[in-house]
Amino acid sequence: MDAKNALEAVEAIRSTVPESELVEFDTGLVEQYSLVAEAVGPVAVVAAEEATETKLDPSDVREALFGKLDVAHKGHAATVDALNTGRHKDKFEVVDRKTTEAEFADWLSDEKRLSYITEQMEAGRVPHVIASPNVEIDSKTYTKAARKFGEGQPYSNVYTDVTDQCTPAELSGTDPSNGNKLHFNVVFEDFDESLYGKVAESKAGLIKLQEDAPSLEAPTRLKALTYGFTLRAERGGVLNGPGTADLLYMRDYMVEPKPIGRGLCVPGSIVDDDGNAFFYGSNVEFQYGGRALVG
């Protein structure tokens, strides 16, 4: 029964109820069926699932995000371990838990950032907290770390023709100059609808979103690695199964496209539903979903 027919049905029943009992009758509707009813005059009846939006208290959202910090820290540690592959000196350091909590608390103190995350969660989006080391990495370090990630999957292939042309800033998307040890992001499981399309369309879409949510940023190779290691820490093993491809797909659409053969590409990666990991160059003309990370 749709809302219009429901309204007519309730009005028909109300016409048989003595006026002295209408208030009690309408109150019963509210309590039993979660319907909005007026005791005097026409009744506006709407099913609760159609009329009520989920509202979250930002303090509850903050608490929920802090609840994800343990997994985020494990993902951070695994990322740092991968970045240190083959390094015998100048190794990257795992940030201790106390510092992680302190920096995350400061990061979440931004009301506009927290408000955006709250709105997205109210819309049903599922967030993941990632904590990348706040460093810049070169292409060799990235390649070794990507291969290290691939060792935990059934199969992997790391193509370097695009990433070898990228600067450390493009590969990382961090800001070591701010003095923080970590670069936090909230990554939602689903794509941002307005970022679907070619690289140019995803880029334009992010710039538009940033007008109201300036903390949003595009994926980078470092953040994609951290995200993968964090999800693996959360799931306790190999990443595979239905939906894995969309969950793990990332394309660095804000990076200046690099010439590969006859086309232009930006860095990208995916873990397919069978668990096979691919790190490659994504053609700028290829249309697919895009992600805006809360940074």
Image (tube, helix red, strand yellow):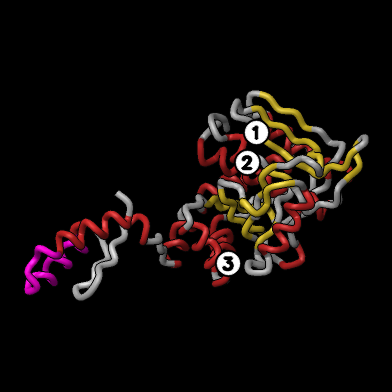
- Looking at the image, which residue is at 57% across and 38% down? 232
Q: For mark 1, give the secondary structure.
A: strand
Q: Is residue 91 visible?
A: no
Separation of disc 1 and disc 2 at Cα? 9 Å
What label does residue 271 carry, if any?
1
Pointer 1 with pointer 2, Cβ within 8 A? yes
Looking at numbered disc 1 in the image, what kind of residue is underneath it? Val
Looking at numbered disc 2 in the image, what kind of residue is underneath it? Gly
Q: Position of residue 284 (x, y in %)?
A: 81, 44
Tell me if 121 is positioned left or right of 1 in this view.
right
Q: Position of residue 164 (x, y in %)?
A: 87, 41
Q: Position of residue 172 (x, y in %)?
A: 76, 52
- Residue for badge 2: 228
What label does residue 113 carry, if any?
3
Looking at numbered disc 3 in the image, what kind of residue is underneath it? Arg
Quarter of the rendering containing residue 245 = top right
Q: Which residues are magenta?
A: 15-31
Separation of disc 2 and disc 3 at Cα? 23 Å
